[in-house]
Amino acid sequence: MTSTLVVGAGSAGCVLAARLSADPAHTVRVLEAGPVWASAVEMPAHLLDPGHLPVGPDSGVVWRYPGNIVRGKLIGGSGAINGSYFVRPTAADFAAWSAAADSARWSFDAVLPLLAELESDRDFGSAPGHGARGPIPVQRTADPAPVSREFADRCAALGFAEIADLNAVPASSTAGGDPGRPPDTGAGRPASLGADGFGRVPLAVAGGRRAGPALTHLYSALTRPNLDVTGGTTVTRLLLRGSRVIGAEWARGRERGTTFADRVIVCAGAIESAALLIRSGIGPESQLRSLGIPVVLPAPVGAWCTDHPEIGIEYRGPVPESTTVALEYVLELDDLELRPYTPMFTPGLRRLGVALMSPEATGELTLGSADPAVPARIDQGYLRSARDRDRLRAGIDVAAQVLGLPLGTVDDTWLRTYLGTSQHLSGTCRMGPVGDPRAVVDECGRVHGIEGLTVADLSVVPVPLHRGPQAAVVLLAALIADLYAV
Ligand SMILES: Cc1cc2nc3c(=O)[nH]c(=O)nc-3n(C[C@H](O)[C@H](O)[C@H](O)COP(=O)(O)OP(=O)(O)OC[C@H]3O[C@@H](n4cnc5c(N)ncnc54)[C@H](O)[C@@H]3O)c2cc1C
């Protein structure tokens, strides 16, 4: 019997704990900082409504960080509060990931069977590279909201091609090109952009409910005698004996305790996983010393991270009668994604997001205190690169054409004013081979230099992904769980 302690029941933690505990030779103990309801039917209905992102000032289920960054703090993690967009990374993303990890394990051809196994695609389930029997229901909106339909019509009128399936397999998946791209008509598009096309967003929803990993994976496994999930419990520090992890210390209200295990898999998300490692003495040496944390292992935790900067263009528009999901269509242009949101985030104003999916500039996460209650600092590095600013300007140009709105001069001040985050941080515990000075974990998520310790969440992704990260993190957790099956 191997005992595994999983830190965090978020997107990755739910999938990983469910897959590991399917084997009775494992005992799996999960500690989650946020609430864990005993069954899915007990989850508050508003948390399951995919048209509502429960991240506002009154939300009791988020972690908050400077820079308007939020993360889910509940069973299901960020996957339980997100926009339900479930789009696979591109074949080129997997090629870059595989190269950075120095492992064919992460190539598109290697991961494709698992991507298909995980999904039940209601629209394309029988198409090559798709699945119709997996735990995650995927579908595209059949009856788009007026704002989405207008967006699609405008994209078509400008000559952009419509992509039927954003999750389609490319003709030659080893070629490293983007999947599902029909020949580009090119008509009416800015010559500089090499437009790709617009399409309906694959969504992880079913029966009008957000189908996050708690619902698709963890709740159905909770009756297993070898799986225990405890909520309201924050892991404050990993316990190490020499260079081996032996468990973790935790806090639950005023209670303090320790849990021992043969191995620990950290799934606390790109921010809290890195913070936990640093608090435990695994991190940049100078930072550890300045925080007064004994150095267990110098490692570049938090030294590299990436996200998708997003410019929010707001304009007057009619109040929607209702919204079923936040985003129904996107337009993809090389490394840009245009997102016509269906809800109004500011009363009376519609929003079109312009996101840069492959920024050149990278960011850094650091701790200002060893106290777990003090949030990590994240310097996203947004707009630091002239190339990134130019790419965003190019996207805003297209947005102006799609909206038929003159946006005036888009200088750097303008960009800074409307800049936001896509909430897609990754890479704080980067994957890479021994000898890679930026790498924290190996191709299987094992922390270099520490026995028994694995990180399995968005922290380990070593390259910017051209799509939102939810499909990637689910895949990653499933793949790592399978590697650790006894
Ligand atoms: C508002 C919002 C909308 C988004 N929309 C989309 C979208 O539509 N599509 C998309 O692709 N991506 C989206 N994302 C991003 C995506 O949801 C996340 O990147 C992804 O879910 C992260 O998965 P994870 O497992 O790495 O971390 P998380 O899902 O965040 O899980 C981390 C878990 O660990 C717990 N935890 C943290 N620290 C501790 C600790 N010390 N002890 C115990 N437990 C701990 C947390 O409470 C949480 O449950 C969105 C993100 C946000 C915040």
Image (tube, grey):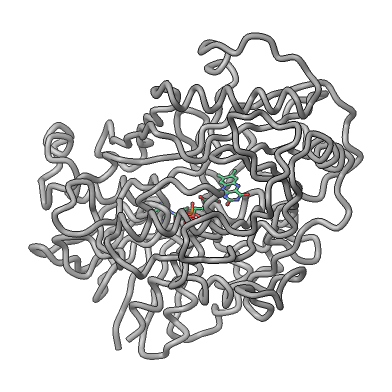
Q: What residue is shown at x 58% (from left), y 74% (from top)?
A: 116
User: Is 96 placed above or below 393 here?
Assistant: below
Q: Is residue 35 visible?
A: no
Q: Which residue occupies 71% across, 53% down? A: 201
Is there any visible trace of residue 398 in the rendered image?
A: yes
Quadrant where the N terminus sits is bottom left
- Nearest the viewer among 52 and 463 is 463
Front residue of 330/197: it is 197
In the depicted view, which residue is nearer to us: 168 or 440?
Answer: 168
220 to the left or right of 340? left
- Left or right: residue 140 versus residue 232 is right
Q: Position of residue 319 (x, y in %)?
A: 88, 31
Tell me: residue 44, above or below residue 18: above
Q: How many marks?
A: 0
Q: Position of residue 394 (x, y in %)?
A: 59, 25
Q: Is residue 347 left or right of residue 248?
A: right
Residue located 69% across and 74% down the image? 127
Does 88 sit above or below residue 112? above
Q: Is residue 240 above or below residue 316?
A: below
Return the x and y of residue 195 as percentages of the image width and height.
Answer: 64, 39
Report x, y in % for residue 392: 55, 26
Residue at the image position 52 percent from the left and 47 percent from the top: 466
Examine the image and state in which quarter residue 264 appears.
bottom left
Quadrant occupied by the C terminus: bottom left
Given residues 484 and 127, the one toward you in this image is: 127
